[in-house]
Amino acid sequence: MLFSYYRRPLFLLLLFYAGGIFLFKDFFIRPPDVPPFALPRSGVLVEGRVAEYPAAAPGGAKFTLQTSKIYGQPFETGLMVYARSLGGASYGDRISFLADLEAPPGAAVPGSLDWAEYLLSRGIAAQARAREIEVIGRANGFIRLARKFRYSAMSAFEAGLPAEAASVLGGVVLGEKKSVPPGLKTAFQDSGAMHLLVASGSNVGFVVGVVFFFCSRLGFKRKYSGLAALLFSGFYVTAAGLDPPLVRAFLMFSAGLCAWLLRREAGAFHALTAACLVILLLSPRYLFDAGFLMSSLAAYGLIVGMALWGRYMKKGGLAGHAVGLFLMSFFAQLCLYPLLAVYFHKISLVSLVSNMVLVPASGVAMALGFLLAILSGTGFVFKGLAYASGFFMKAFIGVVRFFAGLPFSSVSVAEPSAWYVAGFFVLALVLLHAPLLGFRRRRLYFAAALGLALMAAGPLVKIYAAGPLKYRAVLFGDSNTSCALLSVPSGLFLVNPGVSGKKLADSVLAGGARSLEGVLLTSLEEKNFSGLAELSGLVGIKNVFLPYGPRPVELKQVLAKLEKAGARVYAVWPGEAPVPGLKVAAAWGGDRAGYSGSRDVLDWEIEALGIKKEGGYAEQACACLNCPAPVLMEKRKTVTLEFELPAAACGK
C-alpha cells in the first residue's frame, strides 16, 4: 500500500464521480415517477416485477415492486406492496394485482425514520395494499434455483433449531434478520455485533474460500477453481438478496479474479475501488445508502490498516493471533463510528473485544448453517447436526448477551456536526497511514492536529455564526397525544413524552444534544407521559414540570427514579415560574374557566415563547405549545416552525 495508489486513474475517477453525485444529486438521482392520478386511489390494476425477497409483515408480507404497467399502460416506478397472500410470488417474478394505492406516511417523531423519505431514497413513490396476486411470469432458472436454496435453508433452520436460534442463524447465513426478536437485536447492537446479522463480505469470502478449497482438492486448475468460486458466490449473493454489501464483495472478488486472469496487479484496494465504481455507475443512489457506505468503509479500513500495520504485528502463538484479531476488529470499525452516531445514535464500547470472539464464531455458525441446508431431509444425520448447531447457537447468543449486559457496553451519542465528522475521518486516515507518514515526521502530527482542529471547529463556528435569537418548535404525536420538541437558547424542552421513548430519545440525539433541559406535562393523563420511563434511560433529563394533582402510580415510580438520578421535579400552578434563571412558567390552557390539576390542560411559557402579545412571532410561538393538530397526527406527520424573535420582544 503506497500513496501512489490514490493517484491512480481508477481511484481518481471514483472520487470525482462520487463527488459529482454528492454535489449534483438531483442530476444523477431522479426521483421516482408518481402515479398519474391523485392518491389515495382504490382498485388500481398494477403489473410489475418483484424486486426483493418478500418479508413478513403484520397481516401478511411486504416487498418492493418495480412496475411495468398501471391500468394496462406502460408506467415504471417503485411501489412498496403489502399483501395478505403472495399467491406463490417471490423475487424475480412478474405479477399482476388490484391494489389500493396511498402516499407513504412521514415521520411520526422528529429524528426518527421518515418512511416517506426512506422509500423515496430507494426509488419508491407509493404504497400498495394488494388484493389477490397473480403470477404472470416466472423468474429465470438461476434465480428460481437460488430462491429454492434460500427457502429450503430457512425451513431447515426453523425445523431443526429453536425459534430464536433459527432467526439468528438466518441472519448470519442469509442476512434475513427481520424475524430476530427486538430485544435480541438490541443485544447485538449493544455488543457491536449487529453487522453479523447482515450478509456481507465475510459471507462471500467464506463461500469463495470453501469452493476454491474443494475444487483445488479435486484437482481443478487454479483458473477453473476461481471460476467455480465466482459462479457459486454469485449464486449465494442472489440467494441472500443482492444487498449492497454482498454485491460490493462479489464485485471485489470478480475484479480480483479478472485482473489475475489478465496477469495484471490484483490488489484488494484496486478491487474495492472497481467494485464501488461499478455499483455507483449502476445505481448512484447507493452513495447515500447506509449499508453500502458502512460496508465499503469497513473494507477500506481493513485493507489499508492491515497492509500498513501488518508488519508491526507479533507473529505466531496465541498472543500473535489475539493481536491480529484485535487489529482486524479495530481497523474494520475505525471509520464506522461517525456513521453509527449519525444513523443509530449509539456506539458500542465493547465491540473491539466482542468481535474478536464473535466474528470467528460466526464463521463456525455459517458452516453449520450451510451444512443444515445441504443435509436437510437426511433423517438422523440432520437431527444430530441440528442438535449440535442448536447447542452452538445457544452459546453464541449467550456470548452476545454477555457482552451486551456489561456495564456501559454501549452509549447513546448525539448526532455529530459535519465539522466533527470531517475531523474524525482526518484522524482515522492519519492513523491508518501513520507507517507511511512516518512516526518521526512532522507531517504526521500536523495532520493529526488538523483533524483535532476540525473536530473542535463545529462549536466555534456555531457561536461565531449565531445571529438573532432563533427558536424551533416541532409538532408531532399520534391520534391520542400531541407533543412538541422546542429548541430555545437555554436548551431543548419536550412537551408531553407520550409516544415511544426510544423515538423521543432519537429526536433529542438527532438535535445534537444528549439531555433535555426540561420535560413538561400539560396534564397528568397517562397518554402524556407513557414514554417518559424509556426516554429517561436513554438521555438525561434535568427538570420535570407538571401540574398539581393526584399522580398515577406509574408516574410516581418514574419521577422517583428521575429524582434519584439528580433530576428536579416541580409541581406548578398556573402563573408560577419555579426555577430562578430558567424562564419556564405555567399558563392557563385553552379556554377553561377553572383549574383542578388532574385532567385540565396547562400551557407553558418558555423564555420569550410565552409572551402574550398580539401579532408577531410571540403569539405564533405560544400557540405551538398546546396545538392538538389532530389531522396531522393521524397522518403521522411532523410540522416544524422555525423563526427569529427580535431581542426587544423578549426583553433582552
Image (spheres, rainbow, N blue to C red):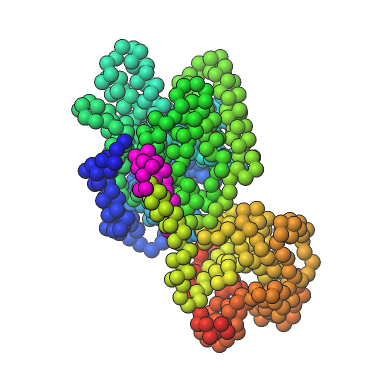
Q: Is residue 580 above or below residue 455?
A: below
Q: Residue at x 60, y 67 (%)?
A: 493
Q: On the picture, is 295 further left or further right than 275?
A: right
Q: Residue at x 27, y 30 (%)?
A: 266
Q: How many marks?
A: 0
Which quadrant holds the C terminus? bottom right
Q: On the picture, is 154 further left or further right than 47?
A: right
Which quadrant holds the N terminus? top left
Residue furthest to the left in view is: 262
Examine the rendering and report whether any part of residue 533 can be seen. yes
Q: Is residue 209 above or below residue 398?
A: above
Image location (x, y in percent) of residue 591: 66, 81
Q: Nearer the viewer, residue 386 or 519?
A: 519
Q: Is residue 432 above or below residue 222?
A: below
Image location (x, y in percent) of residue 396: 58, 29
Residue 496 location, quadrant: bottom right
The dominant secondary structure in magenta is helix
Q: Residue at x 60, y 84 (%)?
A: 612
Image location (x, y in percent) of residue 387: 59, 20
Residue 353 magenta-highlighted: no
Q: Nearer the viewer, residue 540 or 237?
A: 540
Residue 439 magenta-highlighted: yes
Q: Residue at x 55, y 72 (%)?
A: 489
Residue 629 location, quadrant: bottom right
Examine the rendering and report whether any part of residue 282 can be seen. no
Image location (x, y in percent) of residue 196: 49, 35
Residue furthest to the right in view is: 550
Q: On the picture, is 387 further left or further right than 429?
A: right
Q: Which residues are magenta?
A: 419-443
Q: Nearer the viewer, residue 285 or 14?
A: 14
